Amino acid sequence: MAYHTIISFSNKDREHITEKTLRAVAKQYMKERGTDALYIGTAHYDKSHIHLHLVMSGTKYLTGQANRLSRAQFHELKISMDKFQQQHFPELIHSLPRHGRSKELLNVPVIDRRNGRISQKEALLQTLTAVYPKSKSIDSFLAALRSLNYEPYYRSGRLTGVRSESGLKFRFNRLGYDHDSITKLDATRVREEKQLAELRDIRARQNSLEREEDDNRVSRMYERDEEEKDHGRQYEADRENDAEEQESGEEEDNDQDDMR
């Protein structure tokens, strides 16, 4: 007895999937499923979507105990694999099935594990999950969506949702992104711009103080030079006065000698 697992990736992520990616995912799956079993696996590239086939022994190779998982345990395994993929391969935005999220809340179909296909709504949800946290404004958010072939549409001048390549419309509020969460992006941009402006003001004041200090330093050096020059001129004047007084004293002495 053995267990056969297929791990599929969306064809939209094909360019991001490498042999290193597949090896990492396969190793993580075996680690999560249990390292005390025997595995054999291979990657298939023959279809539009790349996928892994992993076959595991039905019993543990040392104890002979069954490797069967309960439905709850297998559900936890899928959630753990989702987290691993999101953490290590965030670029695979179309290949994250969002296990553990309420279907009633999200109103999205489950991925068909037989062929790896996902609905357009699920693909958009994964795109929003990847794009929204990185967006610094509504403009950057919409630009990122446009780059992925999602065109925004408006009603009564208000941003409502996006239109896919096939023409289907999806409202943001039905995807978990209400008006407040969208406008919050611009609030974040305004806050960051304010912080940058305050930082520029601080730097400008600091530069002004540094320039003023430099000017004061130059002024003090100039004043010191002038003082030294004044001292020099005073010294020369004092020497000249001393010389003149000495010459005058010598002339008086000569006159007195002549009178005698």
Image (cartoon, helix red, strand yellow):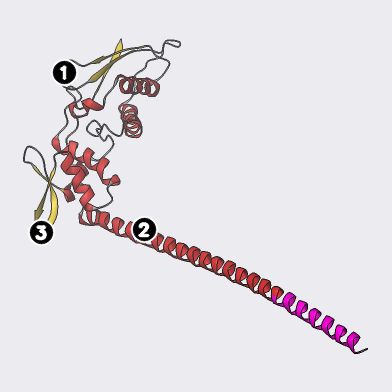
Q: Quadrant of residue 92?
A: top left
| N-term-proximal mark, 1 vs 2 | 1
Name above or below for residue 100 compared with residue 258. Answer: above
Q: Position of residue 15 (x, y in %)?
A: 22, 26
Name above or below for residue 203 compared with residue 99. Answer: below
Residue in front for this viewpoint, 99 or 136: 136
Magenta run includes residue 245: yes
In the picture, the disc for residue 196 is 2
Residue in front for this viewpoint, 5 or 150: 150
Q: Dot 1: within a 10 Å radius of its alpha carbon, few (fewer than 14), some, or many (20 or more) residues?
A: few
Residue sitting at the far left:
167
Magenta run includes residue 124: no
Numbered disc in front, either 3 or 2:
2
State the SS at label 1.
loop
Q: Residue at x 62, y 69 (%)?
A: 224
Residue range highlighted in magenta: 237-259
Q: Position of residue 33 (x, y in %)?
A: 37, 22
Residue type for callout 3:
Gly
Numbered disc in front, either 1 or 2:
2
- Marks 3 and 2 sit apart, C-alpha to C-alpha, by 31 Å
- For label 3, the residue is 157
User: Can the viewer see residue 196 in this picture?
Assistant: yes
Name above or below for residue 258 compared with residue 53. Answer: below
Q: Residue at x 32, y 26 (%)?
A: 74
Residue type for callout 2:
Leu
State the SS at label 3.
loop
Residue type for callout 1:
Lys
- For label 1, the residue is 47
| N-term-proximal mark, 1 vs 3 | 1
